[in-house]
Amino acid sequence: MKNISIIGTGVMGSSIANAYIKAGFHTTIWNRTQSKTKLLVDSGAKLAKTVEDLILAGDIIISALGTYENLLEILDSKKIDWKSKILVNVSSGTVKQARKFGEMANNKKIPYLDSSAMSGVKLVGHKDCLFLFSGDKNDFLKAKPSLEVLGIANYLGADFGLTPIYDTALFTLAWGSLIGFYHASALLQTENQDLEKFAVLATKHTKFITTLFKQHSIEIKNGKYNNDDGNIDIHLSAMEHVQTVSKESNLATDFPSFIINMLSKAQKIGFGDNGIASTVETIKGNYEK
């Protein structure tokens, strides 16, 4: 499938188009505002006059519009034979929206894959860029060699709702990690420390943290929380220390206060001597041990 058509040439759409142009694919683009397509056309993309022309030109049609509604609005009145094509949508949305759109695609006999770009736009086209996909497995396998031009093509399953829930989960994980890094960086700046040096050290330390993911996922699944790496009581005391040091350094304490609140809840409902993964029980609203 060497013919790629891209609907929408915003930041993400342009990055996707550039990746395919550089890989030598026949790349066709369309955007409501045609002036935003000039750089891509100059780089080798073909500009379609209409959405119908764009779809007809492609084996894989990738939508990089903002929402499911934007794509539905464009496709709604189009009479296209999709038999030999695959529609891929990287719009952001909810689980409910993804399933509803997937049902619509199935009803219209449109081979459809829901997708999320998990590595921003700078890495698109790089081997480490992660894209998630859900939908019919045969459609995914057919498109996979072409989708791997974008980076890692990770298939989640047939349920269209899997892409947005994993997108949301990974986005949550990213921000949880980053806000910790930002608070740590601000703390080190109060002592005039080199943040680039810290970034190198933090990357090494992160390897230890990622080893906990598998162990803690099993504990959360089973509802049994080992305290090999310290219990709730110990970590609550340590986080209160972070809060104190932050105050003394004239920093905001929103981050440590948030963690203290979560750990305190876990302690109050009887998980004080359990491992820190038991904090998940407060997130799930289970207030009885």
Image (tube, rainbow, N blue to C red):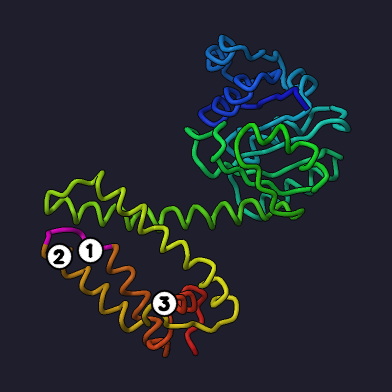
Q: Which residues are magenta?
A: 249-254
- Left or right, 107 with respect to 49, comes to right
Mark 2, secondary structure of its residue: helix
Residue type indicated by callout 1: Thr
Residue visible at 73% across and 46% down?
101
Image depth: mark 3 or mark 2 in front: 3
Q: Amino acid at mark 2?
A: Lys
Q: Position of residue 109 (x, y in %)?
A: 86, 40
* SS at circle 1: loop
- Observer-nearest of 53 and 155: 155
Q: CA distance from mark 1 to mark 2?
A: 7 Å
Name the amino acid type tagged 3: Ile
Relative horizontal placement of residue 219, taking residue 277 as reference (left or right): right
**Does 81 appear above or below 112?**
above
What's the mark number on residue 278? Answer: none
Q: Is residue 110 left or right of residue 198?
A: right
Query: Which disc is residue 247 wearing?
Result: 2
Which quadrant of the figure contains the N terminus? top right
| Mark 2 surroundings within 10 Å by alpha-carbon count, few (fewer than 14), some (14 through 19), many (20 or more) | few
Check contact, mark 1 vs mark 2: CB within 8 A: yes
Which disc number belongs to residue 253? 1
Mark 1 vs 2, N-terminal side: 2
Q: Nearer the viewer, residue 228 or 115?
A: 228
Residue 259 placement (x, y as % from top left): 33, 70
Q: Which mark is residue 276?
A: 3
